[in-house]
Image (spheres, grey):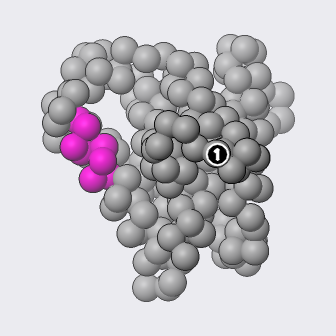
Amino acid sequence: MSQTSLEYTNIINVCREIFTKKTKDYGTAWRILRPSSLTDQIFIKAQRIRTIQETGENRVGESVFDEFVAIVNYCIMALIQVRESDLNDLELDKDLAISLYEKYATEAYELMLKKNHDYGEAWRDMRVSSLTDLILMKILRVKQIEDNNGTTLISEGIDANYFDMLNYSVFAMIHLKK
């Protein structure tokens, strides 16, 4: 397994473990949230990261790494909400929730492998602050698409942006681990 695949898998394992524990604690209360509310949750996390990066001050105490974990998990929740429209129950069985998590984590991983090949691992030479800015840009794009009722003329859809934000967050966490 390549270095990137191993690092990526290790980060996703951390994110999945937190998702699983929170699912045991809270169930799937997040299912009440509309995709636009999940987008706003991702925005809050990314904006907090940027503020800490710019000021160098962290008053809440949760680490930047933990905020990137939250972005990954909120992106997967949003993908479930957007793509699994046939699920009507607010409370999902724990095993189903984790299975859906795995489904979208795997899809994100496969997308990362394709893009990582084509871009030649350019993310390795990027700053964490740039990855944060890219996440914020993607959030603004998603908000615009949401405001346009999901329609685009030429651009990728909402789900593609969630996958990109997820992968940028994983790359940032790989950088932060070093």
Q: Quadrant of the N terminus?
A: bottom left
Visible residue check, residue 157? no
Residue sitting at x 73%, y 45%: 55
Q: Quadrant of the C terminus?
A: bottom right
Q: Which residue is mark 1?
A: 57
Total label count?
A: 1
Residue 144 x, y percent position in the rendering: 76, 22
For label 1, count other residues whose C-alpha is less than 10 Å away and answer few (under 14), some (14-19) or many (20+): few
Left or right, 164 with respect to 85, comes to: right
| Amino acid carrying mark 1 in the image | Glu
Judged from the image, the secondary structure of the residue bearing numbered disc 1 is loop
Q: Quadrant of residue 138?
A: top right
Classify 20 as above or below 3. above
Classify 68 as above or below 87. below
Q: Nearer the viewer, residue 72 or 103?
A: 72
Left or right, 88 with respect to 50, comes to: left
Residue sitting at x 71%, y 68%: 123
Q: Nearer the viewer, residue 171 or 119?
A: 171
Left or right, 49 with respect to 30, comes to: right
